Image (tube, rainbow, N blue to C red):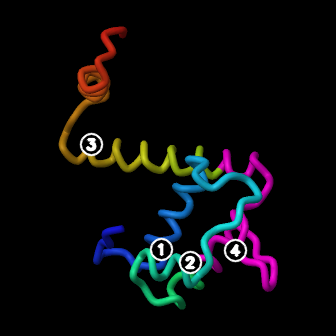
Protein backbone atom coordinates (compact mmCIF):
# COMPACT_ATOMS: atom_id res chain seq x y z
CA UNK A 1 0.00 0.00 0.00
CA UNK A 2 1.30 3.41 -0.94
CA UNK A 3 0.45 6.18 1.52
CA UNK A 4 -0.57 9.74 0.71
CA UNK A 5 1.15 12.41 2.82
CA UNK A 6 -2.02 14.54 2.87
CA UNK A 7 -4.06 12.14 5.02
CA UNK A 8 -3.13 10.43 8.31
CA UNK A 9 -1.92 6.87 7.73
CA UNK A 10 -4.44 5.35 10.14
CA UNK A 11 -7.32 6.91 8.15
CA UNK A 12 -5.87 5.59 4.90
CA UNK A 13 -5.77 2.14 6.49
CA UNK A 14 -9.38 2.57 7.68
CA UNK A 15 -10.42 3.42 4.10
CA UNK A 16 -8.41 0.49 2.74
CA UNK A 17 -10.06 -1.98 5.12
CA UNK A 18 -13.52 -0.49 4.43
CA UNK A 19 -12.87 -1.12 0.75
CA UNK A 20 -11.89 -4.70 1.47
CA UNK A 21 -15.06 -5.22 3.52
CA UNK A 22 -17.35 -3.53 0.98
CA UNK A 23 -15.85 -5.48 -1.92
CA UNK A 24 -16.37 -8.65 0.13
CA UNK A 25 -12.70 -9.60 0.29
CA UNK A 26 -13.47 -9.92 3.98
CA UNK A 27 -16.86 -11.58 4.36
CA UNK A 28 -19.40 -10.97 7.10
CA UNK A 29 -18.18 -12.38 10.39
CA UNK A 30 -14.70 -13.02 8.98
CA UNK A 31 -11.64 -12.43 11.11
CA UNK A 32 -9.38 -9.59 9.99
CA UNK A 33 -5.60 -10.06 10.01
CA UNK A 34 -4.06 -9.62 13.44
CA UNK A 35 -2.61 -6.24 14.32
CA UNK A 36 0.86 -7.73 14.10
CA UNK A 37 0.24 -9.39 10.70
CA UNK A 38 -1.23 -6.27 9.12
CA UNK A 39 1.46 -4.00 10.55
CA UNK A 40 4.13 -6.24 8.97
CA UNK A 41 2.25 -6.39 5.66
CA UNK A 42 1.73 -2.61 5.45
CA UNK A 43 5.07 -1.76 7.10
CA UNK A 44 3.54 0.48 9.77
CA UNK A 45 3.64 0.57 13.55
CA UNK A 46 1.22 -1.88 15.23
CA UNK A 47 -0.27 1.05 17.17
CA UNK A 48 -1.36 2.56 13.84
CA UNK A 49 -3.21 -0.64 12.93
CA UNK A 50 -4.75 -0.77 16.41
CA UNK A 51 -5.96 2.81 15.99
CA UNK A 52 -7.43 1.94 12.56
CA UNK A 53 -9.24 -1.08 13.98
CA UNK A 54 -10.54 1.09 16.83
CA UNK A 55 -11.90 3.62 14.34
CA UNK A 56 -13.60 0.86 12.33
CA UNK A 57 -15.12 -0.48 15.54
CA UNK A 58 -16.45 2.98 16.47
CA UNK A 59 -18.00 3.20 12.99
CA UNK A 60 -19.71 -0.15 13.60
CA UNK A 61 -18.05 -2.11 10.79
CA UNK A 62 -16.00 -4.46 12.95
CA UNK A 63 -16.04 -5.83 16.48
CA UNK A 64 -13.35 -7.26 18.70
CA UNK A 65 -13.49 -10.50 20.66
CA UNK A 66 -10.97 -10.27 23.44
CA UNK A 67 -8.14 -12.69 22.86
CA UNK A 68 -9.57 -13.81 19.51
CA UNK A 69 -9.16 -10.82 17.21
CA UNK A 70 -11.16 -8.35 15.17
CA UNK A 71 -14.05 -9.48 13.00
CA UNK A 72 -16.27 -7.98 10.30
CA UNK A 73 -19.79 -7.32 11.54
CA UNK A 74 -22.42 -9.81 10.51
CA UNK A 75 -25.09 -7.29 9.48
CA UNK A 76 -24.93 -7.05 5.68
CA UNK A 77 -27.36 -4.09 5.68
CA UNK A 78 -24.84 -1.91 7.54
CA UNK A 79 -22.11 -2.89 5.07
CA UNK A 80 -24.41 -2.09 2.14
CA UNK A 81 -25.27 1.32 3.65
CA UNK A 82 -21.55 2.06 4.00
CA UNK A 83 -21.03 1.06 0.36
CA UNK A 84 -23.79 3.40 -0.76
CA UNK A 85 -22.42 6.22 1.41
CA UNK A 86 -18.91 5.87 -0.04
CA UNK A 87 -20.28 5.68 -3.59
CA UNK A 88 -22.29 8.85 -3.01
CA UNK A 89 -19.27 10.67 -1.59
CA UNK A 90 -17.22 9.65 -4.62
CA UNK A 91 -19.88 10.97 -6.99
CA UNK A 92 -20.08 14.30 -5.14
CA UNK A 93 -16.29 14.68 -5.21
CA UNK A 94 -16.28 13.90 -8.92
CA UNK A 95 -19.08 16.36 -9.68
CA UNK A 96 -17.38 19.07 -7.60
CA UNK A 97 -14.13 18.62 -9.50
CA UNK A 98 -15.97 18.74 -12.83
CA UNK A 99 -17.76 21.92 -11.76
CA UNK A 100 -14.40 23.53 -10.95
CA UNK A 101 -13.29 22.67 -14.48
CA UNK A 102 -16.48 24.17 -15.91
CA UNK A 103 -17.70 20.86 -17.34
CA UNK A 104 -21.49 20.74 -17.82
CA UNK A 105 -23.69 17.83 -16.80
CA UNK A 106 -24.29 17.01 -20.45
CA UNK A 107 -20.52 16.90 -21.07
CA UNK A 108 -20.08 14.67 -18.01
CA UNK A 109 -22.61 12.19 -19.38
CA UNK A 110 -20.82 12.16 -22.74
CA UNK A 111 -17.46 11.61 -21.04
CA UNK A 112 -18.84 8.70 -19.04
CA UNK A 113 -20.42 7.11 -22.08
CA UNK A 114 -17.25 7.56 -24.09
CA UNK A 115 -15.08 6.01 -21.39
CA UNK A 116 -17.46 3.14 -20.67
CA UNK A 117 -18.28 2.37 -24.28
CA UNK A 118 -21.97 3.04 -23.58
CA UNK A 119 -23.66 4.45 -26.68
CA UNK A 120 -27.16 4.66 -25.20
CA UNK A 121 -28.51 8.04 -24.10
> Which tag, 3 or 4, sits closer to the chain's start?
4
> Which tag, 2 or 1, sits closer to the chain's start?
1
| CA distance for labels 3 and 4 | 34 Å
The image shows residue 19 at horizontal and vertical percentages of 52, 55
| CA distance for labels 2 and 1 | 7 Å
Point out the frontmost of discs 3 and 4. 4
Horizontal side of 108 relative to 60 (left or right) equals left
Q: Which residue is mark 3?
A: 99
Residue 118 lies in magenta, yes or no?
A: no
The image shows residue 53 at horizontal and vertical percentages of 62, 76
Disc 2, disc 1: CB below 8 Å? yes
Q: Which residue is mark 2?
A: 52
Point out the frontmost of discs 3 and 2. 2
Residue 54 lies in magenta, yes or no?
A: yes
> Which tag, 3 or 2, sits closer to the chain's start?
2
Q: Please state the extent of the stretch shown in magenta in the rendering.
A: 53-81
Which residue: 56% across, 78% down? 52
Q: Which mark is residue 11?
A: 1
Disc 3, disc 4: CB below 8 Å? no
> Which tag, 3 or 1, sits closer to the chain's start?
1
| CA distance for labels 4 and 2 | 10 Å
Disc 4, disc 1: CB below 8 Å? no
| CA distance for labels 4 and 1 | 13 Å
Amino acid sequence: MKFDKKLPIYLQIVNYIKGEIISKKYGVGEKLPSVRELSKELKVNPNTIQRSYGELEMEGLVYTKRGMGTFVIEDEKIIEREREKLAEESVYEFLDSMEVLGVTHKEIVKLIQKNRGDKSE
